[in-house]
Every structure is written in C-alpha cells, then in structure tokens.
C-alpha cells in the first residue's frame, strides 16, 4: 500500500513572466514541506511542461493536483475536477492534464486517481520578465487555496473548494 | 531544388487560405495558400515566427551562466541547448578536448535526450498521424492494420521516454533544470548505484527500440509508394559526423552531401561554420533560410535531423543500428533516401543507436572516472554544435575581457529545416489540395508533412497541430469568404 497522500505537478517556464506561477507555487510548497512533517506524503513535481512520462507519476497515488498559469481562467483562479480526455494536445510536445490522465488510462495500470486542476489567471509571458502584479495577486490567492488543500489531502475535502 | 510554388505570378488575383495555430506563449507557424478561382494551388508558404529574443536576453551575462540559462530556451530539448552551449563555453576556456570521463558523461546525457525525444515523437506525436492523419482509404487501412497489431505501443512509448528522462536526471542531478556541463567538463561523476540502475533497464530499452524500428519499417512498406512520394523532394543534407564518416550525434566535423550523395564538404571544423553556412532571408518570412554558401541560396538549402544524419553516415557505430541503417539505405535504391515520411524510420534507427550507445558507455570503465574538468588558454569566441534530436544545433558566443557575452547567434534545428518544410508543404499542397475543395482532412496532410520534421515548438515556433487552429478563406479583395476553426477540444466550428 502506498504511503503517498498526493502528487502535485507545478509547471511552466520561470523565465517567461506569468508562466512562472506554477514553479513559484511549487517553490513555496517545497519550503512549506520542509517545515511541516505532515506534508511528507505529498510528492511535489516541477517541470517546464507536462508530457507522457508524467502519467507514471500517477501510479499508486490516491490524489493528484495540477497547477498551471492560464490565460483563459477567471481571476484569480479556477479549481476544477479533471476528466481523462485525449484532447488535441496529444499531437504536440506539451500535454494537457486531461491528456496525461488519458495516457495513464492507456497504460492499463488501474484507475486514475481523483485529479484536480488549479488554473491561475495569467496574462504576460515576456522572456526574462517577472510575474506581473495582477498575476502575483492571483498567485497569492492560489497559494492560500493550496495551503487549505495541503491541510487535508482528500478528494472529499478538495471537492468543497471547486469553483 | 527549385522555388516551385514559392511565389505566384499575380497573387492579387488569387484566393488566400491561412492555416494558423494560435498559441499561448511563443511564436507560431502559419501556412498560407493562394488558390485561383478553380482552387488550383498557385502559391504556398510556411511562415514560422522565429523566437530570437534569447540572443538579446543573454547579452551582458557572464559566459559561465550560459549552459544553465539556455535550458530555459526550450522545454523540449533543454539538454541539447545545454550541451551546445557547454561546448561553446569549452572553447572560451580553452578546453575543447575534455577528459575521457567528461566527454563520455556528456555523450551519455545527449543519448538520453535523443532516446526520450525520439520515443515521444514516434509513439505519441507521429503514430496518431499514421493512424488518423491520412484520409486516403488505402493508406489508412494498411497502416492501421500494422499498428493495431501493437496494442502496447503507448506503454512502450511512455517507458522509453521515462528511461531517457531518468538517464538525464541521474547525470544532471535533477529532473528539470539540472546541470552536467560546466566550462571545460562536467560537475559530477556517475555513481555506481545510478550506473547499476541504468544497466538493469537498458536491455529492455534496446529491445523496445529494435521493435520500434521494425514497426516503423513495416508502416513504411505497408504502402511504400505512398510513403516514398508523400511530400517527396530532393535536397542536400547537413550533419555532424565522425572523422571516419560514422554517425556522431555529439561531436565531429560538419559534413554535407548533395542530392545525389556526393560530398559537398566533410570534416569541417564547426568553429568555422560561418565560412560554409549562411543564414539567408526572404522578404515574406521573419525566419531565416540557412544555405551552403558554395551552392548559393537557390540550390544550397539543406535538410537536417534523422533523415540527414542516416543519409550522411557511412556507418553507425553500434551493431543493431548499423544493420538497420543498411536496410534503410537499401530502400533508397542505391542513392539517398529523400522521402519526407522516411524521417520516422530514420528517427527510430537513431533511437536504437541511442539505447545501444548508452549501454556501451555504461560498460566503459572510463565512465566511472573522477577526472572531470580541464582548462586551457582562454578565448573570446566559442562555437558549440550538437546533433539535437531535430537536427544540427549551433550556438555561437563572443565575450569581452570582462567575461560578459557581447554577441550570441543560435541556429536551431527547425531553422535549418525551414526551406525543407516549405518544400514539403508545397509538394503536399500540389498533390493533395490542387483543384479540390478544402477540407480539414486535406489541410491535415500539410500538418503531417511538417510534423515529420518534428519542428521544435519552443525555440523556433510552437507546435503545428496545437489547437485551436483557424483557417480563413479570403477572396482576391481580402474579404472573408469562409472560415473554419478547430477548437481546443478538437471540435470543428
């Protein structure tokens, strides 16, 4: 039986302005995990983008959270339950979280864990830029939510925060 | 080797079709087709909005930061940029010849990158094209039959990719943003534990890679006429190569062959690449068009990547891949292979070579050495080349006496293939779209041709095929006649 409570994927390019929201939230999560022993069962994975190999990180995990910047999410963030889907991202170098779940299904290693997407509103992606003030405010709101999610890493508890 | 369909005689009289993927962050690719009143194709151009900002971004930075910083150029091949930059920086510190251990560790890192990148492309990017991408009933029926016999494809692809990523993680220390290359060498030795872990998995990777070669070959021959002629054109080929003519993905000299297989140049020291390669411009594109200076822009453009490397190599220095290279070249009838879709087959031969190469390095006692760094006489200019998964990657830096970057020039693989992708698109448009009513399936043929080159989405363009895609049909006055949008969820509106 796994001892993991959840896996969290935070992704984006920290050198591209608001795209650094995911990596910054993961940096905060890592700092928090270093201080709070109860978070030891939450695996934190940071990357540029999602790809097929991330499906393997879902094996034997009871709960999953994907954290990303989004130009289409309502501010400050949306928090939604993910459904497996082979959307058109499967033909690109960057998979959507729903497509990662689809790849997991293709691997036939069991039922995918309940999975959630935290999309933080972002607008500016200039090379070398910092996270812009509006996105920074969205990031703070998203971090407040993540702290609540980490406090009780269970699907039933997370469902209460769906937007 | 012509400008066939590049420029129409009277473009103002023609209808214009635009295939434009809308992207979130980076530049993007766009195909424009000019059709006459009877839907005959008169002009085809692939516009790629090249991402050049990085060369400005790094100016003023100290040179030793560059191998780390360039990894943020691209989420797809950060290792390739890391190694090309590290090689350029080696020249800056006068350490072009590394210690045997450092050279082998870097080579293994590079092969891990090649393995994971090629696995992703074949199993998850191109296999959907091969399954669904063609609306030709005969071609589709045969290919589906071949692939349907391999229900475990997806799992093999994921595990091959994962293994390559693990090689990168073990050598560079981290899953993302790790480093191995430093000026004049590498920053850590390989641990016995990591070596053993990789050895335990590598034989399975070789077996799966061999199976992938077999599958790509079967797909090719399931309808050979179609695969030989889809997007067919002849070209020159450019790659790095070992002094003895063998394939070398990490180092060597520049080698170019013409369309008949005759050497244009060979064993060229890549420090002098700009004496042989020039980046041409065209007034309709922001992206440059590199060409071989000796042949001129009109005749001197070339292809890079797996097809170029296998065509250019006299041999592949691992046994199973060498057998497959001979089979591949035999399909060319004694000459070079020019088929666009042969890129897929060549890519799998390279994946097999990468897996075999990793095993050979793991079994090499020098890989466990601790002599990791060397230095020499400092220089103010450095050039680094590697054969990235998509093709030859150039990094060129100049520094001042304060060790700051004052000039940078990067020629990424996708730029090297710019004219070739335009040629492929023109051939496909002329053969499959000419005189017909445009449909999503027909337009998809264009994307399939581009995707065979595996264009990199982060440092040259974003992915063709990334949705939503918008297609507009304009009349001669520029008025919108029709519009088709493929939404992010794949629905056509």
Image: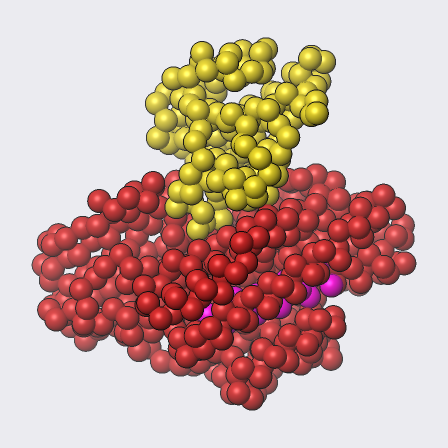
Q: Considering only vertical position in the picture, is A22 above or below B143?
A: above
Residue B298 magenta = no
**Side (left or right) of A147 relative to B52:** right
Q: The red chain is which one?
A: B
Residue A33 image position (x, y, % from top left): 67, 18
What predominant SS class does the magenta segment belong to? helix
Q: Considering only vertical position in the picture, is B207 above or below A147?
A: below
In front: A24, or B406?
A24
First to last magenta residue range: B339-356
Q: Which residue is drawn at 60% across and 72% down?
A: B309
Q: Quadrant of the C terminus of chain B?
A: top left
Quarter residue B114 falls in = bottom right
What colour scheme governs how the chains and residues are painted in the rendered image of this protein?
by chain
Residue B9 in view, yes or no: yes
Q: Which chain is yellow?
A: A
Residue A104 image position (x, y, % from top left): 54, 39
In front: B318, or B185?
B318
Q: Which residue is drawn at 78% across and 59% down?
A: B359
Q: Considering only vertical position in the picture, is A153 above or below B427?
A: above
Counting labels gives 0
Q: Residue at x 61, y 52 (%)?
A: B156
Residue A15 in view, yes or no: no
Q: Residue at x 24, y 53 (%)?
A: B471
Residue B380 image position (x, y, % from top left): 68, 57
Q: In which quarter of the image is the N terminus of chain B?
A: bottom left
């Amino acid at each position: 039986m796994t001892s993991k409570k959840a896996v969290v994927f935070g992704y984006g390019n920290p050198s591209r302005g608001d795209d650094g929201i995911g990596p910054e939230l993961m940096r905060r999560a890592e700092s928090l995990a270093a201080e709070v022993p109860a978070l030891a069962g939450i695996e934190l994975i940071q990357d540029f983008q999602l790809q097929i190999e991330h499906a393997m990180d879902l094996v034997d995990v009871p709960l999953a959270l994907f954290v990303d910047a989004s130009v289409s999410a309502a501010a400050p963030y949306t928090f939604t339950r993910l459904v497996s889907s082979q959307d058109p991202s499967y033909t690109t170098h960057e998979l959507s979280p729903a497509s990662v779940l689809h790849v997991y299904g293709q691997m036939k290693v069991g039922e995918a864990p309940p999975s959630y997407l935290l999309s933080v509103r972002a607008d500016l992606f200039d090379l070398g830029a910092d996270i812009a003030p509006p996105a920074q405010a969205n990031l703070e709101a998203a971090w407040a939510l993540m702290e609540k999610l980490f406090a009780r890493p269970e699907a039933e508890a997370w469902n209460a925060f769906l937007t | 080797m012509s400008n066939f369909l590049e420029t129409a005689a009277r473009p103002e009289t023609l209808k214009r079709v635009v295939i434009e993927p809308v992207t979130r962050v980076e530049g993007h690719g766009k195909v424009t087709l000019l059709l006459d009143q009877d839907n005959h194709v008169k002009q085809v151009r692939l516009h790629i909005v090249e991402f050049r900002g990085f060369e400005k971004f790094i100016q003023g930075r100290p040179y030793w930061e560059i191998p780390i910083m360039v990894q943020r150029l691209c989420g797809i091949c950060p290792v390739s940029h890391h190694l090309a930059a590290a090689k350029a920086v080696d020249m800056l510190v006068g350490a072009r010849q590394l210690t045997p251990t450092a050279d082998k560790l870097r080579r293994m890192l590079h092969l891990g990158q090649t393995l994971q990148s090629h696995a992703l492309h074949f199993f998850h990017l191109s296999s959907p094209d091969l399954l669904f991408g063609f609306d030709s009933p005969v071609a589709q029926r045969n290919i589906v039959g071949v692939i349907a016999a391999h229900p475990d494809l997806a799992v093999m692809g994921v595990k091959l990719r994962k293994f390559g990523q693990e090689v990168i993680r073990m050598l560079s220390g981290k899953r993302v943003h790790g480093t191995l290359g430093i000026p004049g060498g590498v920053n850590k030795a390989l641990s016995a534990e990591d070596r053993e872990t990789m050895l335990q998995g590598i034989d399975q990777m070789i077996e799966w890679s061999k199976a992938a070669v077999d599958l790509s070959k079967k797909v090719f021959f399931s309808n050979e006429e179609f695969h030989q002629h889809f997007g067919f054109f002849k070209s020159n080929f450019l790659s790095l190569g070992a002094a003895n003519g063998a394939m070398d993905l990490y180092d060597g000299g520049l080698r170019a062959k013409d369309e008949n297989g005759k050497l244009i140049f060979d064993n060229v020291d890549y420090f002098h690449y700009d004496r042989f390669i020039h980046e041409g411009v065209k007034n309709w594109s922001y992206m440059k068009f590199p060409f071989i200076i000796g042949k001129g822009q009109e005749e001197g453009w070339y292809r890079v990547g797996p097809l170029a490397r296998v065509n250019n190599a006299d041999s592949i220095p691992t046994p199973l891949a060498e057998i497959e290279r001979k089979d591949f070249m035999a399909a060319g009838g004694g000459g070079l292979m020019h088929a666009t879709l042969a890129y897929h087959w060549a890519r799998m031969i390279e994946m097999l070579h990468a897996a075999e190469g990793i095993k050979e390095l793991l079994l090499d006692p020098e890989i466990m050495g601790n002599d990791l760094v060397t230095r020499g006489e400092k220089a103010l200019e450095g050039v680094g080349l590697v054969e990235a998964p998509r093709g030859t990657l150039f990094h060129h830096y100049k520094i001042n006496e304060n060790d700051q970057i004052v000039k940078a020039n990067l020629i990424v693989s996708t730029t090297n293939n710019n004219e070739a992708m335009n040629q492929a698109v023109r051939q496909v448009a002329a053969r499959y779209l000419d005189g017909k009513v445009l449909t999503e399936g027909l337009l998809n043929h264009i994307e399939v041709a581009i995707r065979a080159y595996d264009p990199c989405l982060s440092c040259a363009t974003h992915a063709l095929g990334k949705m939503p895609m918008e297609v507009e049909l304009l009349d001669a006055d520029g008025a919108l006649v029709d519009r088709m949008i493929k939404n992010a969820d794949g629905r056509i509106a």
